[in-house]
Each structure stands twice: as C-alpha cells, then as structure tokens.
Image: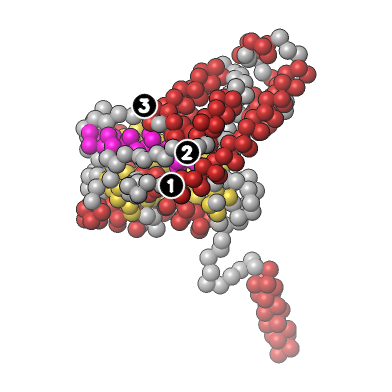
Amino acid sequence: MKNSITTSVRTIAFFLISILTLGCFSPNTEAKPTPSPDKQKIMLALLLDTSNSMDGLIEQAKSQLWTIVNELSAAKCGNGTRPDIQIALFEYGNDGLPQAEGYMRMVTDLTTDLDEISEKLFGLSTNGGDEYCGYAIDKSIKKLDWSKSKADLKMIFIAGNEPFSQGNVPYESACKLAKEHDIVVNTIFCGDYNEGIRSSWRHGATLTGGSYMSIEQNQKTVYVRTPYDDKIDRLNDEMNKTYIHYGAQGRSKKEKQIAQDENAEFYSQANKVKRAISKSSHAYKNSSWDLVDAYEDNEEVLESVDDKFLPEPMQKMDSEEKKAYVKELTQKREAIKKEIQTLSTQRKQYIAENKPTEAPVNTLDQAMVNSIKEVGKTKNLIFE
C-alpha cells in the first residue's frame, strides 16, 4: 500500500513538472498574448466633443489625422509583421443630435478606409450641447465589433472639456465595461490640466489603465516645410494614377481619394505630404474599389469584374491584357511607395533638426501617439 501511494505521488509530481516545463502552467504570472501572423490589430475609437466650444479640437483632429496614421503605420508586431489598423469616429455633446441617443452618434464604424475617416472628419461641425462622457464610452463599446483577442490593442480616446461625470450613465460603470472587454480608455481634457483632474477626467482613465492628458484645443498645428515636400507631392500625383476603380462605387471612391488630398492641402502642402506618406504605407489599402489592391489580395478578382464599372481603356481589354495592365501599375505603385518612404525618412530627420522652438507640445496628435506607444508595449508592438 505504501509503495502504491509513493508511486502515485511520484506520478503526480512528474505530471506537474512536465506541465511547468512545457509552459502550459505558470504560477503567479499573467499569460502573454501570442498573436498569429497577420492577425494582430490596432483598433481605435475616437470620441470627439462637438459642442460649441470645441471648434479648435475638431480643427486639430482634421489637421493631425495623417500624423497619427503615420505613427500607427510605423508599428510592428513582435513577430515582425504589421498590424491591421482600424479606426472608428464618434461625435457627442452636439444639440443637433437626438437627445434620446445621448446627443451622440457613430460617424463611422471601425474601418480601414482612411479616406472615409477623413471625409467624415471634415464633415463635422459644432453646435451647443450636453456632454455625457459615460454614455458615449458605453455606447462606443456596445456599437462597435471589438476584437475578442487579448493580443489586439483596443483603445478609446475621448476628448472634451465638461465634467466627466455628466449624464445618466456613470463613467465608472462605462469604464468597468471597457476593462472587461480589454479596452483602454484614454481621456483628453481640453483645458487646464488640474481642472481636468478636478472634473474626473484623470480618474476615468485610471480605471482602465489608460492615460489622462490635457491639451490646448485652440493651438494651431505648426508645419515645417522641407526640401523633400515638392517631390513627395509630385510622387503622390503619380501614385494616384495607378489606382484603377472598379465596381458600382469605384468611381465615387476614386473621386473621394482626390477630394481628401485637397482637404489635407487646405491646411498646408506639408499636411498633404503627410497624407501622401500615409498612402505609401501598408495602412492605406483600398481593395473594395481599387483593382491593384484587390488583385494583390485575390488574383481571381479580374474574372468577376463587370467591364461597365471599369475605366474606359480597360473595358476593351481581354483578360490577359487586363492582368498585364494591373501588374504594370502594381510595379509602378510599389516603386513610387518605396521612393516616398525613402524621402519620408530624410524629411523626418530634417524636421528633427529644424523644428521651431515655438512648436506646441500639448496637441491632440501628440497626446494620442504617446498613449498608443505606451500601451502598445503591453501588446508586444514596436514603434520604429
């Protein structure tokens, strides 16, 4: 009997040691996410206060969108791949929105369509209102199809200037819900740092391990002109020519691409250049309307395209001619992208060496980028 017990104890001990050795169980440690190649995501929901006092915030968002995208596109997963980037946009605190919906609306769902984000952002306007932060956070969690993977970086950025505690949904319960979904809430108070603390903006961020930041929402974005801007601008025009619209909405999507170039240029050529750099990155992909991107995903797409929704020159081509044409433009676009990326590196170095001393520091883009990089470390994301 004694020998039998001893044998059983040894068997159990050997089993436990084997599990520990294989790494299946680790006492007093938290398991780290192990993202699959090409699966890891960065998912961001931007909740902007569009009440009357927030014109400066909206202007910063419009003028700094491509700076934020460029920082996101520089991210690498621990295995060397690039994460997919999805952005959603909400507005809240606007009297023009239904009271029954808490004066908020989802402007765009989580999307990879950066032209759509830009278009909708430029369509925002301010109008009075009551700002219900708890309600806005709660609804953004429930309305969006957030990933369930612990490997993905999921973040909400909410910006405004009224007390964080307003509304009939307590921010504490909304932040608790966010934490349950592995979503980090970052709060951006538009005004004095200490006032934001007194009005609970910091506490809201603390509840999910997020960052609290204050910005001067009326600060103007400072652009540094560089010797590389004109060439990148010309290359952007050449890159636009490599996009082949297809499908019922293809032509309008192509027109939207050009319109968003113009929106970016409204602020300065340097801002348009930042957009061009974004367009040369993996983050800018338009498989739903551009044949070059679609063909890269699935070569059989050419067999299913309706000729009447193609540009006129392609409507007369046979299947082999279409394939050759798409491949030619693919190679041309890749060469242009590579050249823009090289110039972008040189441009970044020039700006670092010639940045004006009066450049603002408390701006929306810097607040977001700093937080993304900090929390990104917990998801094994590396920013170049």
Residue 226, disc = 2
Say which label, 2 or 3, has the lower sequence index.
Answer: 3
Instruction: Determine contact: label 2, label 1, CB under 8 Å.
Output: yes
* Amino acid type, mark 1: Asn
Judged by depth in the image, the label closer to the viewer, 3 or 1, is: 1
Residue at the bottom extreme, as displayed: 2
* Amino acid type, mark 3: Gly
Q: Which residue is at 56% across, 72% downward?
A: 27
Residue on which disc 3 sits = 123
Q: Position of residue 134 (x, y in %)?
A: 30, 46
Say which label, 2 or 1, has the lower sequence index.
Answer: 2
Residue 354, disc = 1
Q: Which residues are magenta?
A: 48-73
Secondary element type, mark 2: loop
Residue 132 versus residue 257: which sits nearer the camera?
A: 257
User: Does residue 111 appear anywhere in the picture?
Assistant: no
Q: Position of residue 107 (x, y in %)?
A: 39, 31
* Amino acid type, mark 2: Thr
Tell me if residue 245 comes above or below residue 364 in the rendering: above
Q: CA distance from mark 3 to mark 1?
A: 33 Å
Q: Is residue 331 left or right of residue 204?
A: right
Q: Is residue 52 magenta?
A: yes
